[in-house]
Image: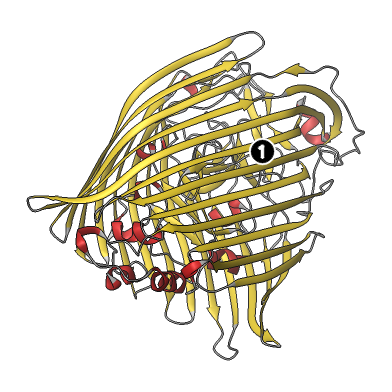
């Protein structure tokens, strides 16, 4: 078994069950098919060594039915942004991490409070598509801290088989740091050019009999400033990751994190429809990009949010070939939000800058996700076929208290913003409550036909219900559906895989936003379908390459003539996606991606949208980040990045577009020792040329890009 455990950290494809046992801390248990297992201490050393290689690529993924497997064996596009990439870039936010993956853009919000993300032009749902350690659905309505994360993963496309009702944009998975065989004690601090400052402490230890327990604690706090006017605030994080090898056949993992953020929220900019001539009666106006430090909102308009996530996992070895996993968790997010949107009122306003700032007050919101999972994984043979079977069931409950709301307005100028006095709404009203229950059972079988061919087949039965309570009405509906999944994979060599897959999924179609006549209405779920063919290869032992063609067909939401947010037809997303991550020789590390996308609205209740591109969907995105280790000075490295997003339509009718943009980054870091204490000194600049650009569109709103930001940091490892 020693060699099998070793393969889990090397370039060759590991035995998935062996890796699952290893990750659960069970290498003291006989493994599948009667193999002998080495002591757990040796396994931990190997696992930590793999994490310590400081690579831009990863040899395992931790998401979906592919948890603990080599990405070569995943018949979908998957990207991993490792800790080394996050450290090299000084990434602090979700978008800062995911900009390294193809097709990722912001949607609706500029990112001053949290990152609303689209992948391949499809919105990533904030209460279902973000997961902690591959399981718990956390609530992306506050910036998710990265200090306690080992990496960020994206499994793109339809993922309903494992995760229930989620849109086919993809699953974003946060993998937490854990204690390894080597003690960790580090203190890091940073400041940026706008006055933000923070400190981060990271401590990890193993202890107990035979080092059977491990604890990793992360704490961070700091002052926030992103360089825009009227912005101020603070954030904090406290987390722990605990694991315990209770017995040779039983292990326990606990993850607990609490974080908060209290900042001023940057205003969004609304579009203006101008009435013109008879030949061109309506023109949608995209205003000139404001200065990238401009904010027409006031600093008292706060976004005050906090989140607590708890996940417990137990792995039990049932036999040499089967393990049972039990998981339960809860994610709770609370927020008070005083959000604003600027709107021009007349055609003359676009020139003079005069307009109205609409301020929406929402206090007392609470969102809670409760998630339970039971799953068994094992191996058996039928004749000449080898099976790796996954059988599981999930129960996910999402409750939302939408709080009390009110509104106010203020006469504001777009070009020369006026100070805004503290305002209060004239009246408050109750916004309502919601409850979603998503239950399901799933079966997934990886069938090996010899050494080169694999067939992966799965099915999920879902039972979904939704209840929304308003002051004027209560909406209830429920549905059941079966979602199939089928993939075929061919591996001409151990380091190359070619695959074709077909998946169906049931997805929620969204909630009507605040600026629509049916605001808050939750639309019924609908079916999406995805086809994908691709090839993956690992070359030079540590450079991972992917190429895939995908075709996604999903329900289309639109705005009807009564300004209602409704399901109105079907859209298709076809694209070619390329990526590369890892090391080229001893000096170069890269992570790169490209997407060529053809998205089209095929059918809709709004005739003006047929044949058009869905809003906020670029036809092209590119990213490239590379780091070079200087041979003349050991420990010194320099890096640079380029990120391009093509032009995007501001609505489904494609009445106007925001322009494409390309921004650049640069950085350097130096690892040395001061009195035998390892020290890392670092500097990173984002938006190197200080470009002014629209970074986001969607739902009739625009958001500007952040100004040039220099961040310097120091980390001490004791």
Q: Is residue 205 found left or right of 58 in the rendered image?
A: right
Q: In which quarter of the image is residue 494?
A: bottom left
User: Residue 261, position in %: x, y?
Assistant: 73, 46
Q: Residue furthest left?
A: 383
Residue 168 in the image, given as x and y percentages of width and height: 42, 38
Horizontally, is 423 left or right of 17 in the view?
right
User: Which residue is drawn at the image coordinates 54% and 78% (left, top)?
Assistant: 628
- In the rendered image, which quarter is residue 30 located in? bottom left
Position of residue 679 measured from the top left corner of the image (x, y, whole percent)? 67, 79
Furthest residue in direction top, as rendered: 472
- Decide if residue 427 is on the left or right side of residue 49: right
In the image, residue 642 above or below residue 55:
above
Give how far across and how far down residue 374 sits, in percent. Answer: 38, 40
Pick the front one: 618 or 673: 673
Seen at 60% across and 49% down, the residue is 256
Instruction: From the viewer's perspective, tell me whether residue 240 is left or right of residue 291.
Output: left
Q: Which of 127 and 638 is in front in this view?
A: 127
Looking at the rendering, in which quadrant would you find the N terminus?
A: bottom left
* Secondary structure state at the residue bearing disc 1: strand
**Mark 1 = which residue?**
702
**Disc 1 residue crowd, few under 14, some 14–19, many 20+, Cα 10 Å:** many
Would residue 603 be visible to someone looking at this image? no
Between 204 and 259, the one lying in front of the other is 204
Residue drawn at point x = 52 percent, y = 27 percent: 510
């Amino acid at each position: 078994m020693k060699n099998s455990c070793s393969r889990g950290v090397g370039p060759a494809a590991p035995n998935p069950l062996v890796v699952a046992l290893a990750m659960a801390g069970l290498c003291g248990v006989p493994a599948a098919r009667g193999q002998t297992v080495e002591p757990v201490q040796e396994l931990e050393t190997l696992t930590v060594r793999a994490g310590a290689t400081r690579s831009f690529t990863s040899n395992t993924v931790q998401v979906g039915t592919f948890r603990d497997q080599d990405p070569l064996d995943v018949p979908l596009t998957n990207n991993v942004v490792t800790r080394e990439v996050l450290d090299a870039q000084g990434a602090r936010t979700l978008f800062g991490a995911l900009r390294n993956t193809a097709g990722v853009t912001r949607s609706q919000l500029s990112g001053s409070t949290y990152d609303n993300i689209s992948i391949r032009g499809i919105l990533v749902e904030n209460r279902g598509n973000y997961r902690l350690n591959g399981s718990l659905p956390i609530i992306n309505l506050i910036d998710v801290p990265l200090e306690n994360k080992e990496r960020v993963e994206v499994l793109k496309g339809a993922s309903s088989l494992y995760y229930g009702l989620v849109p086919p944009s993809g699953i974003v998975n946060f993998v937490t740091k854990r204690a390894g065989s080597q003690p960790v004690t580090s203190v890091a601090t940073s400041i940026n050019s706008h006055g933000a400052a923070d400190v981060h402490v990271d401590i990890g230890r193993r202890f107990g009999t035979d080092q059977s327990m491990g604890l990793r604690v992360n704490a961070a706090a700091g002052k926030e400033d992103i360089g825009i006017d009227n912005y101020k605030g603070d954030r904090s994080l406290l987390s722990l990751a605990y694991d315990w090898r209770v017995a040779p056949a039983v292990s326990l993992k606990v993850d607990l994190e609490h974080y908060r953020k209290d900042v001023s929220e940057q205003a969004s900019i609304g579009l203006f429809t101008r009435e013109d001539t008879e030949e061109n009666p309506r023109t949608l106006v995209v205003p000139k990009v404001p200065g990238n430090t401009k904010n027409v909102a006031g600093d008292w308009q706060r976004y005050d949010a906090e989140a607590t996530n708890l996940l417990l996992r137990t792995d039990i070895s049932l036999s040499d070939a089967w393990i049972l996993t039990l998981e339960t968790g809860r994610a709770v997010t609370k927020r008070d939000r005083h959000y604003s949107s600027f709107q021009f009122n007349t055609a003359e306003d676009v020139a003079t800058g005069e307009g109205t700032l609409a301020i929406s007050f929402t206090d007392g919101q609470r969102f809670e996700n409760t998630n339970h999972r039971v799953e068994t994984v094992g191996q058996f043979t039928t004749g000449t076929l080898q099976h790796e079977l996954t059988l599981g069931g999930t129960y996910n409950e999402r409750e939302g208290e939408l709080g009390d709301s009110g509104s106010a307005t203020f006469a504001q100028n777009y070009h020369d913003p006026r100070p805004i006095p503290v305002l209060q709404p004239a009246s408050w009203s109750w916004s309502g409550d919601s409850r979603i229950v998503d239950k399901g059972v799933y079966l997934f079988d990886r069938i090996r036909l010899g050494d080169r061919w694999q067939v992966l087949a799965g099915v999920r039965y879902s039972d979904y219900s939704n209840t929304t309570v308003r002051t004027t009405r209560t909406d209830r509906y429920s549905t059941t559906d079966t979602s199939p999944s089928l993939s075929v994979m061919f591996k001409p060599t151990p380091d190359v895989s070619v695959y074709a897959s077909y998946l169906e999924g049931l997805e929620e179609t969204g909630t009507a936003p605040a600026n629509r006549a049916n605001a808050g209405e939750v639309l019924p779920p609908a079916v999406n379908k995805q086809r994908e063919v691709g090839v993956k290869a690992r070359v030079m032992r540590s450079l991972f390459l992917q190429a895939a063609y995908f075709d996604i067909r999903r329900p289309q939401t639109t705005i009807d003539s009564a300004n209602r947010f409704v399901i109105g037809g079907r859209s298709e997303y076809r694209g070619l996606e390329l990526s590369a991550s890892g090391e080229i020789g001893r000096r170069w590390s890269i992570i790169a991606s490209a997407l060529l996308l053809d998205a089209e609205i095929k059918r809709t209740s709004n005739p003006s949208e047929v044949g058009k591109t869905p809003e906020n969907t670029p036809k092209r995105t590119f990213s490239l980040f590379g780091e070079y280790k200087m041979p003349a000075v050991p420990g010194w490295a320099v890096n640079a990045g380029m990120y391009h997003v093509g032009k995007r339509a501001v609505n489904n009718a494609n009445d106007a577009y925001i322009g494409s943009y390309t921004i650049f980054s640069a950085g350097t870091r130096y690892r040395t020792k001061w009195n035998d204490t390892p020290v890392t000194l670092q500097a990173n600049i984002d938006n190197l040329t200080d470009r002014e650009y629209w970074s986001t569109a969607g739902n009739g709103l625009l958001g500007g890009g952040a100004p040039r930001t220099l961040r310097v940091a120091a980390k001490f490892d004791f």
